[in-house]
Image: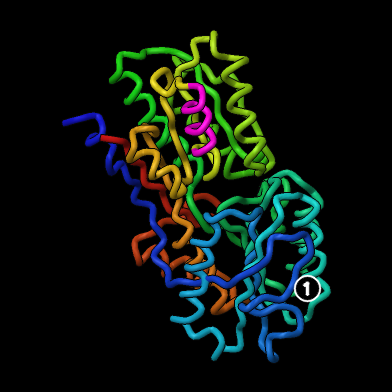
Amino acid sequence: MSLGSAFRWLTLTLVIAFAAGCGSGDSGGTPKPNTGGGGKTTGGKKRFVFLTNGDHPYWDTCRAGFNEAAEKLDLAKGGIAVDFQKGNGKLEGQIERLRQYSSESDVAGVAISVINAENKGIAVEMQKLRDSGVHVITVDSDINITKYPKARSHYLGTDNLIGGKTLGKAAKTLLEGKGIKSGAYVQFAGFRDQDNARARMNGFQEAIGSEFKELDRVPDEMKDDVAHANVRSALDKFGQDNLVAFAGIFAYNTPAIVDVLSERSVRDKYAVFCFDAAGDSIKAMSEGNVDVYGRAKPFRDGCAVGRVAQRPGQQRRRHDQEDVSQGSRRIGPRRLHHGPACCGAE
């Protein structure tokens, strides 16, 4: 069996089986009505808002799932309008939006991909919404539930720690298959303190093992030009430090790695590992420029949120039981996860 075949479907089985859903939104700092509903344009319906942490095509896939859920579950008939809003990649933008939702009486639920797990301002606004009767969940990236146990009811999405471990194990196997038993690597992500990024990087570090040294975790605040500059800087700074690999943690990180390695003609010197496989990353893999990618499931996440939107005011206990019967699994206190798929190049 080839190395690629060995990796091709290292797929975890922790999958949430839900119906689908999403809407549309702008990427600015202030919420605006959109085609899925918003403000006072919902015709008397209650709104279930999905707020992302930034603006990237990754979220378009999630929105497609959210929209499909709204249609298949006929949420409009039940008096629910879905409202998908893209954040602007800034902490202040998320806090501002949460404050605005608190002032809008038609908001029945909020699903948020939290940009900073440790930030008290976000946690306070989430809890204020819950105290006023709004159903609040996190998706894809969680709040620190140990510090802020009342900020949300549930997290829905990939188990990012397991996802990172899955990618790290595949990376270790690939490197060792090439005769590389030790070396160093750099990880790139939007933020170091965003829950999903931190968990993925921790998992990757644990699974690739102590023989491979992590030199840095480089944040770019979801700015593509900074992501490219970070890769160039890492090559300049660590190129002589037994550097053997790069790991792109957010969807746009791997295309930035691929671009810079290509412009410097050094692709053959480094392995490239990818999480959140965007279209450009998949294309790069087909061209031999990405070695392993692990992917989250944004469409499924959108589906899951649509299911929650169907009954935004109800407790999740009964739905948790349904999830188990459909083949998914609860992990930890009120966290519903599904696993990533991890694939390797032929």
Callout 1 amino acid: Ser
Q: Which residues are magenta?
A: 255-264
Q: What x and y, as percent, mark residue 151? A: 71, 58
Going 64% across and 74% down the picture, which residue do you hit? Answer: 83
Name the residue that disc number 1 marks: 132
Dominant SS of magenta comes to: helix
Looking at the image, is 73 positioned above or below residue 128?
A: below
- Residue 259 belongs to the span the image colors magenta: yes
Going 52% across and 68% down the picture, which residue do you hit? Answer: 317
Q: Is residue 334 visible?
A: no
Looking at the image, is 137 positioned above or below residue 143?
A: below
Viewed as shown, does residue 263 lie left or right of 90? left
Looking at the image, is 180 positioned above or below residue 206?
A: above
Viewed as shown, does residue 316 lie left or right of 299? right
- Residue 184 belongs to the span the image colors magenta: no
Going 62% across and 15% down the picture, which residue do you hit? Answer: 237
Q: What x and y, as percent, mark residue 77? A: 54, 91
Query: 318 or 245: which is nearer to us?
Result: 245
Q: Is residue 112 visible?
A: yes
Q: Secondary structure at mark 1?
A: loop
Q: What x and y, as percent, mark residue 37? A: 66, 80
Which picture quadrant has residue 131?
Answer: bottom right
Which picture quadrant has residue 126?
Answer: bottom right
Going 51% across and 78% down the picture, which residue do you hit? Answer: 70
